[in-house]
Amino acid sequence: MNGTADDTGTIGIIVTHGRLAEELLRTAELIIGTVKDCYAISGSDLCDEELVQRIRHIIVDSGRAHAVIFVDYFGGSCCINSARAIDGIRGVKVVSGVNLPLLLDFLTKQGKMGFEEMVRHLVSRGSESIKELDF
Amino acid sequence: MITVLRIDDRLIHAQVVIGWGRIIKPDRIVIADDHVSANAWEKSLYMNSVSPDIKVSILSLADTVDQVRGGVFDREKVILLVRNPQNVLTLIDLGFEVDEVNVGGLHYGEGKEKLLDHLYVSKEERSALRELVKRGVTLEARALPGHEPVILNSRVV
């Protein structure tokens, strides 16, 4: 994997507790239509080794240059096993605290910025979307 | 004091930190594990995953028993985590005293036998559970404090 400015080669993998990943993806599709190159995994019923292997398999099998792994809870098992899965693989980043705004940005802004820039953008988009309403 | 000794192959994770943490309000979580305690990268992974208001210790099985017996945790509420029942046996062999163990999470893997929805055991894990029963330990299975505990003793002998 190498860091090119062309970001068309990025896949997304959402790894969460319960059915959150699947439902996030399904909900994103309600808003922007069919999504490709984004995968959902539930970490809840898998042992650590199986979860790590499944994440690695998706990355390698995709043949793409980059991947962003979205996890729900910083420090949870999905987060820890994602960190294990990408150990030694270049061009893959883990972003915790996945929410719908950041996921939608990932799905709609691919190719508009480089990989590193995209990851930075997603982190700030996710944080900025959490605010107290003050209308 | 050790408030709960939990078998959980995930060790520190959300269910432990939030699910048990908000009920027990531990001062410290101790991971007793020879593999993690000897691996700096794995160690930092778990150290960094808990908010700073809960202390974390990652110790070998032998060091865990030394520190417990030495009174290091006497003034704290501690959640003690091990990855499998074999490690509970080792703790006992090293002089750790325990009447009841929470069997919290043993996840699915190939070739494992299903005991409960959240419990899948390998042959080695099953025979260690059996040995724990023989030594008088109560095996109390539940993922979260609010769940109905299932006593596993009669299911593994």
Image (cartoon, helix red, strand yellow):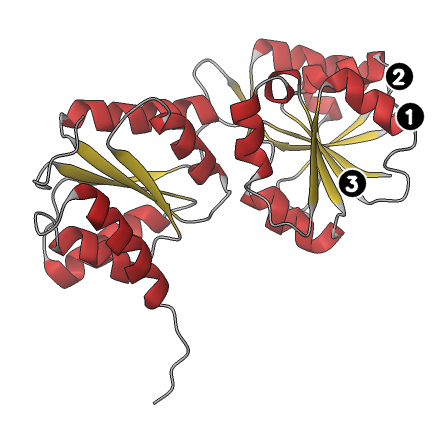
Q: Residues within 10 Å of mark 2 (few under 14, many from 20)?
A: some
Counting residues from the N terminus, which is met first, the one under dot 3 or under dot 1? 1
Q: Chain of mark 1?
A: B
What type is the residue that disc 1 sits on? Arg
Task: Note whether residue B23 is visible.
Answer: yes
Counting residues from the N terminus, which is met first, the one under dot 2 or under dot 1? 1
Residue B127 drawn at (x, y percent): 68, 11
Whether label 2 touches label 3, CB < 8 Å: no
Mark 2 or 1, which is nearer the eye?
1
Label 2, label 1: how many angstroms apart (C-alpha)?
Answer: 8 Å
Whether label 2 touches label 1, CB < 8 Å: yes
Q: Residue at x 15, y 30 (%)?
A: A65
Res B78 label: 3
Query: In front: A20, or A84?
Result: A84
Q: Which residue is mark 2?
A: B95
Query: Where is residue A99, by image quadrant?
Result: bottom left
Q: Which residue is mark 1?
A: B69
Query: In front: A119, or A68?
Result: A119
Q: What is the secondary structure assignment of the residue under circle 2?
A: loop
Vertical relation: B129 (above or below) A18: above
Query: Where is residue A11, by image quadrant?
Result: top left
Residue B137 drawn at (x, y percent): 82, 24
Labels 2 and 1 share a subunit: yes
Q: Is residue B13 left or right of residue B26?
A: left
Label 2, label 3: how many angstroms apart (C-alpha)?
Answer: 18 Å
Q: Residue at x 92, y 32 (%)?
A: B71
Q: Residues within 10 Å of mark 3 (few under 14, many from 20)?
A: many
Labels 2 and 3 share a subunit: yes
